[in-house]
């Protein structure tokens, strides 16, 4: 197609935003079909100005608040796709929309949506095909001080100036992909967020060294839109940073109905309140049976805890350690032990005591005010299951069965999502489990962990979006029966359909399972908490060593999340003498210390549970209905971080030192505070705590852990009575000029 010189007057399409309504200022008439002119079309709102070349589809966006232009120079393409190879032949325009169409019928539609706050780029017509878009628009450089924010588990901040080249795809809802449907970009202090609604969006972040026009490192976000994904939105957010992105995205998430708060969940089901500030304690697995690959022969079998022992452990945590809130989860209660013979899981296995013993254990656990939860799975099926039926399994395009991992039960086969709901809701599954044991909570593994699935079985063909819809169904059905529902890892689409995520905060004592932030030059930031802290109970997953966990504890502190304890020794472990090992030493073992403190002489697991739960349980309880509203880096290396949950006098702040050396900070209650590596200081209206070398004018050269809680009155400053907990280190603490010696814990009466 020959490009005609423009002979048309510069007709623009613009509009203003007034009292929530658009008013058209000038409306361009649609061009006659079949003709195209090199003409710039303009879309305007108070937030942005978008210039579009009607012939090539090249465009640019100016954020009116910040003055920053995306892309910085030149123009961005309308999207690379088979159907968009030729120039556009037809233009249609209205005040808020410009639609460009090729002779072949493929179209790109630019539209101002969300009251002018976002530009939607939408592809129409059968001929378009897969689209790749935004690499050029959303590119930032080191010289721009550019960076990306990716909502993968807690969140990644990926600076352009990292010196690291990489290319990484974050698929919508994939395992360690985008756990929210967004990617944020910042350049020259101006923020923009790309959002979408379809599971066939695959974001690719690419970092290339010396590729910016100024020769500096360049970081770009491109998006592959496969079949059903036809649109992406860009919302410029003006001047700002990661805090601006989080606030801007929260507004979008609220409009989509995703941000269902914990307050609303508690209103629906008061048992959820028992999860606020609760530790996650999991017995993995009561009956541990390992089958061979074919699930035909047993390789090993071991009872790790009987159901009676499980209840006794819960009673020990409550009675001996003073743990008040706990999600107490049992794995391997099923016939055969986890995850053998799934999905045929009744009766509860006789090796651990059978149905009556499990029902009794659940009663004993819940009598403590703990929430009992049973661990189950409907995605994996094994050859030895009585219900084994290849018809229920996902099929590849060639009709063969889709296999999963090699787990305890043998080789897993992947049950297609609609069939998972069917199996779970059989009378002998969830309904009977609820009737027999009545736990207040249920956990179905992998539902929010595995990425969206596809199945080619003509009897139950599904795509990625269908898979999510069926998983929502499964969640809703389980939640209706048991009350509290949770699953593994977590995705934002599950927020309205569940109460807790296990795995979002971290994995195996690390930030990620497979992803290595260093390979992206990235740092981990609690972005999830900035968007959704007030919406869901979240923990990490998979076991880890308490003696290596200080950074993990510090990460939980900045996230204001309690810890999970999944590495539990067999049977009534605290009655056994633990294996002789070297006393924990080094900064990474800090939170396993007991010297001079509450848990001195106790089992190492109990000591770690007590130290960390005293610190993190109340921190979460104090912040559960707030978001992380302000995250700041206090040092140029960004390793000393401050998080503020809530606003004004009700705010709780957490300062954490992720650096290798000591860090001096100041706080309202502690004054000059010296934080060792992984040290922290927490201050809120009714709860404070620290692991520090100096606090309240007192030096602790070896480091000490204390917490303070108002027990009479709601405010630490004015409380008639304060409870002080001492974890380890020098037992003296100074409060309002008075010195207190606290060996384990003490209630003081300040000024009394
Ligand atoms: Zn299927």
Image (cartoon, helix red, strand yellow):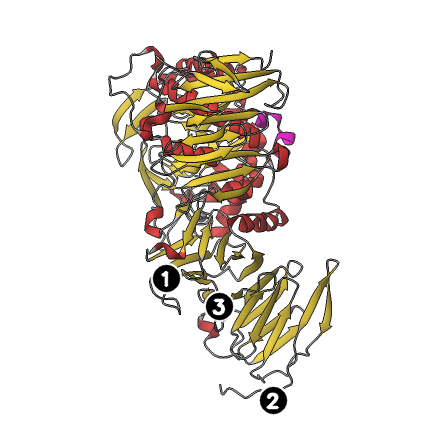
Query: In the rendered structure, does residue 271 fall within the stretch colored magenta?
Result: yes
- Seen at 49% across and 72% down, the residue is 75
- Position of residue 722 measured from the top left corner of the image (x, y, whole percent): 56, 17
- Seen at 62% across and 26% down, the residue is 270
- Seen at 49% across and 67% down, the residue is 71
Question: On residue 7, which mark appears?
Answer: 2
Q: Can residue 159 be seen at all in this image of the molecule?
A: yes
- Position of residue 321 measured from the top left corner of the image (x, y, whole percent): 44, 15
The residue wearing badge 3 is 72
Query: In the rendered structure, does residue 477 fall within the stretch colored magenta?
Result: no
Name which quarter of the figure residue 45 lies in: bottom right
Q: Nearer the viewer, residue 318 or 420?
A: 318
Bin the neighbour count of mark 1 within 10 Å (Cα to Cα): few under 14, some 14-19, many 20 and up.
Answer: many
Q: Is mark 1 within 8 Å of ligand 1?
A: no
Name which quarter of the figure residue 435 lies in: top right
Describe residue 300's horizontal placement relative to residue 105 as left or right. Answer: left
Distance of label 2 from label 3 (alpha carbons): 28 Å
Q: Is mark 3 within 8 Å of ligand 1?
A: no
Q: Which residues are magenta?
A: 264-273
Describe residue 239's horizontal placement relative to residue 563 as left or right. Answer: right
């Amino acid at each position: 197609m020959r490009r005609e010189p423009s002979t048309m007057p510069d007709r623009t399409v613009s509009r203003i935003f007034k009292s929530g309504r658009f008013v058209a200022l000038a409306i361009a008439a649609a061009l006659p079909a079949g003709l195209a002119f090199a003409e710039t079309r303009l879309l305007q709102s108070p937030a942005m100005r978008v210039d579009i070349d009607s012939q090539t589809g090249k465009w640019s966006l100016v954020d009116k608040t910040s003055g920053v232009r995306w892309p910085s120079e030149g123009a961005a393409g309308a999207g690379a796709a088979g159907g968009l190879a030729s120039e556009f032949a037809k233009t249609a325009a209205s005040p808020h929309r410009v639609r460009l169409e090729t002779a072949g019928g493929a179209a790109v539609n630019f539209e101002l949506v969300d009251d002018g706050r976002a530009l939607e780029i939408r592809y129409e017509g059968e001929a378009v095909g897969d689209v790749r878009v935004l690499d050029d628009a959303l590119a930032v450089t080191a010289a721009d001080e550019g960076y990306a924010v990716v909502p993968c588990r807690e969140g990644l901040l990926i600076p352009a100036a990292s010196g690291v080249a990489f290319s990484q795809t974050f698929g919508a809802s994939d395992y360690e992909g985008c756990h929210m449907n967004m990617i944020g970009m910042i350049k020259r202090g101006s923020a923009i967020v790309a959002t979408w609604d379809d599971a066939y969006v695959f974001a690719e972040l690419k970092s290339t060294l010396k590729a910016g026009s100024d020769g500096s490192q360049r970081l770009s976000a491109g998006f592959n839109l496969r079949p059903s994904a036809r649109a992406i939105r860009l919302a410029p957010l003006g001047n700002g940073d990661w805090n601006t992105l989080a606030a801007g995205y929260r507004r979008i998430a609220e409009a989509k109905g995703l941000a269902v708060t914990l307050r609303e969940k508690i209103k629906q089901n008061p048992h959820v309140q028992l999860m606020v500030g609760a530790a996650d304690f999991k017995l993995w697995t009561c009956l541990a049976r390992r089958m061979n690959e074919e699930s035909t022969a047993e390789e090993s079998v071991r009872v790790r805890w009987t159901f009676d022992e499980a209840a006794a452990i819960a009673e020990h945590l409550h009675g001996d350690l003073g743990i008040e809130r706990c999600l107490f989860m049992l794995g391997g209660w099923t016939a055969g032990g986890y995850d053998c013979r799934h999905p045929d899981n009744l009766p509860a296995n006789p090796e651990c005591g059978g149905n009556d013993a499990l029902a009794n254990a659940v009663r004993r656990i819940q009598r403590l005010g703990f929430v009992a939860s049973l661990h189950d799975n409907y995605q994996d099926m094994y050859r030895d299951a009585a219900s084994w039926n290849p018809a229920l399994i996902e099929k590849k395009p060639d009709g063969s069965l889709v296999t999963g991992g090699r787990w305890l039960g043998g080789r897993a086969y992947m049950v297609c999502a609609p069939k998972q709901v069917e199996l779970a809701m059989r009378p002998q599954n969830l309904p009977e489990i609820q009737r027999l044991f009545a736990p207040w909570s249920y956990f179905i593994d992998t539902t929010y962990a595995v990425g969206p699935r596809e199945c080619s079985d003509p009897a139950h063909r599904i795509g990625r979006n269908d898979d999510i819809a069926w998983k929502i169904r499964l969640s809703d059905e389980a939640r209706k029966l048991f009350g509290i529902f949770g699953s593994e890892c977590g995705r934002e689409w599950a927020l309205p359909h569940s109460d807790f995520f296990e795995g979002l905060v971290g994995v195996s004592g690390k930030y990620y399972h497979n992803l290595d932030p260093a390979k992206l030059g990235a740092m981990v930031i609690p972005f999830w908490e900035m968007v959704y802290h007030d919406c869901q109970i979240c923990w990490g997953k998979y076991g880890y060593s308490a003696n290596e966990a200080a950074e993990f504890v510090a990460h939980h502190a900045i996230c204001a999340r309690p810890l999970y304890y999944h590495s539990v020794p067999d049977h009534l472990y605290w009655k056994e003498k633990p294996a002789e090992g070297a006393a924990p030493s080094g900064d990474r073992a800090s939170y396993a210390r007991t010297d001079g403190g509450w848990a001195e002489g106790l089992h190492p697991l109990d000591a770690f549970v007590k130290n960390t739960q005293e610190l993190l349980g109340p921190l979460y309880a104090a912040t559960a209905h707030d978001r992380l509203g302000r995250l700041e880096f206090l040092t140029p290396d960004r390793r000393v971080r401050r998080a503020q949950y809530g606003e004004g006098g009700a705010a709780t702040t957490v300062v954490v030192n992720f650096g290798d050396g000591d860090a001096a900070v100041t706080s309202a209650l502690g004054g000059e505070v010296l934080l060792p590596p992984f040290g922290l200081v927490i201050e809120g209206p009714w709860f404070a705590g620290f692991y520090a070398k100096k606090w309240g004018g007192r030096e602790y050269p070896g480091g000490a852990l204390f917490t303070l809680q108002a027990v009479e009155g709601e405010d630490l400053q004015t409380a008639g009575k304060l409870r002080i907990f001492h974890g380890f280190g020098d037992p003296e603490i100074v409060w309002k000029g008075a010195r207190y010696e606290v060996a384990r814990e003490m209630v003081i009466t300040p000024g009394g």
